[in-house]
Amino acid sequence: MPVDVSAIREDFPILDRQVNGEPLTYLDNAATTQTPRQVYEVYEEFYEGYNANVHRGIHALSHEASVAYEEAHDRLAEFVGASGGREEMVFTKNTTEGINVVAYGLLDELGPDDEVVLTEMEHHASLVTWQQVAETAGADVRYIEVAEDGRLDLEHAKEVIGPETAVVSVAHVSNVLGTVNPVETLAELAHDAGAYILVDGAQSAPTRPVDVEAMDADFFAFSGHKMAGPTGVGGLYGKRDLLEELAPLCYGGEMISHVTFDEAAWNDLPWKFEAGTPPIAEGIALAAAADYLDDVGMDEVRAHENELAQYALERLDSRDDVETYGPPAGVERTGLVAFNVEGVHGHDLSSVLNDRGIAVRAGDHCTQPLHDVLDLPGSVRASFYVYNTKAEVDRLLDALDGGDAFDDARAQVEAYLSSDRYHDRVYEHHRDPKNAGGLADPTFSKHSEETTCGDEGEFHLDVSPDGTIERVAFESESCAVSRAVADLLAGHLEGQSLDAAADLDGWVVDALDGRFPDLRRDCVVGPEEVLREAAQEYLEREPEGIAGDD
Ligand code: 7TS
């Protein structure tokens, strides 16, 4: 049975909201999904009816809260196919914390002869955590390559996973490519090599039926806020015997069974991993989210996701000015498509889309190394959930054209920058930049990377021996707003002292009379921060090189 989208939308009042006078089209679900009233009403019931701490008081409220919280663990275990109930389901803050619990829990088992195997499509939550743990343990990190078609290169996986492998940690579903990875096969490879497998289920638990036992995952981490649940809570499944052995990450109350002045013993599963007061209302609400999704039917959610993604892919691929990433049309994927429109930076495009009430994400989506493999500074991502419709995909595609008034997305960005929301100087410097391009032999330069949007840029400065800035230029793949500001700032600093650059503090905001949309503040203030730091670093590094101050 297809998903009854109109009935579902009734459960999400937020979807009736307007943004900039347009109906909200929420296509940022891979970041966070919306929450149905069946889930957030749990908060009211909890705080109105039985708010208390868990496991502590012999009083009615605490008992009721404890029972509901414990049962929520059973419910989530069941949701991901774990037959062991609450003992195999730890509540965490989110997927990131779940990965950290496993990685740091295994730290003592890792050493210089070990390898941790990841994929090139890992989210920073996994990639950075394992890098840190591997570095501490002296272990190596290796990466399974992503093939041209956006799928994992399984032949490469077979080469990389071997006797040295101690842990394989893989995203079940990529948050950029939409690829669904063959975790069953990877689990087999890992286990044949005597390694553990941790599956990052941040994008799979919300979008498809998950059976941790069928896939033979040792650990499986996911987040509530991506599966129609609340923020502040996530789940970590672990095989019971492995959780028994795993060292806890966080220590304190609740996670102990016995304490003396000299030592402590750990509590039963899963409480051993839940130090301090846990996310009680959140955990109970997460169980309500699992109920909600099971009522819709996870097979139906999966089919709906794929259908919308295929439709979006087909429409985007039919345009000459759009490049999409991930598996080709026809290959099952989760409900998301990352893309770029030729000549338009993702930030500028998402501002234009926001004007039309459309929410997408632009940047590197916390997968900087994957974007390096794709040779892209960033991408725009539209991601769908159970309440999205093909009509909303059409709205996104229509918005790329901009209706009768515009030729294409680029024309819309021009109109956006020249609108009265911005000071005229932004459009002037965008249209006619005087300082774009590098300097052949600068006195010094400063490279910057903005991880949230995936931008990269470099300022070049020529400075005379007395510390006067003679010329500033920049090379950048940043958005149009940021480049225009960089150009404005470069012009302003010519003839000034390096000290003036090192003291920059709000000059750009003043020069623009504060006229820019607040949601582009980072793009406006970013270049100034980079130049200030560049000047400060140079002055620290070369105090002797500057003959005089002004
Ligand atoms: N792993 C994957 C595959 C993810 O997509 C995300 C979040 C995480 C881990 C981390 O989840 P958290 O709940 O701990 O933050 N991904 C995204 C995203 O694509 N856009 O915003 C968050």
Image (spheres, grey):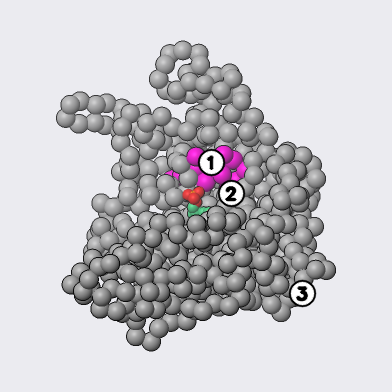
| Picture quadrant of residue 409 | bottom right
The C terminus appears in which quarter of the rendering? bottom left
Q: Amino acid at mark 3?
A: Asp
Between tags 1 and 3, which lies in front? Answer: 3
> At 24% across and 26% down in the image, what residue appears?
259
Front-most of residues 482 and 354: 482
Between tags 3 and 2, which lies in front? Answer: 3
> x, y percentage for residue 288?
62, 34
Q: Residues within 10 Å of mark 2 (few under 14, many from 20)?
A: some
Name the mark on residue 407. 3
Whether the magenta-drawn stretch holds residue 230 is answered as: yes
> x, y percentage for residue 419?
68, 62
Front-most of residues 353 and 191: 353
Q: Amino acid at mark 1?
A: Thr
In the picture shown, does residue 524 fall above or below 490?
A: above
Asked whether disc 2 touches disc 1, contact meaning CB atoms under 8 Å apart, the reply is yes
Q: Is residue 445 visible?
A: no
Tell me: 450 left or right of 111. right
- What residue is pinned by disc 2? 32
Ligand 1 under 8 Å from disc 2 Cβ: yes
Q: Residues within 10 Å of mark 3 (few under 14, many from 20)?
A: few
- What residue is pinned by disc 1? 231
Query: Considering only order in the chain, which callout, 1 or 2, is on the residue closer to the N terminus?
Result: 2
Ligand 1 under 8 Å from disc 1 Cβ: no
Query: Considering only order in the chain, which callout, 3 or 1, is on the residue closer to the N terminus?
Result: 1
| Picture quadrant of residue 270 | top left
Q: Is residue 220 visible?
A: yes
Asked whether disc 1 touches disc 3, contact meaning CB atoms under 8 Å apart, the reply is no
> At 63% across and 35% down in the image, what residue appears?
39
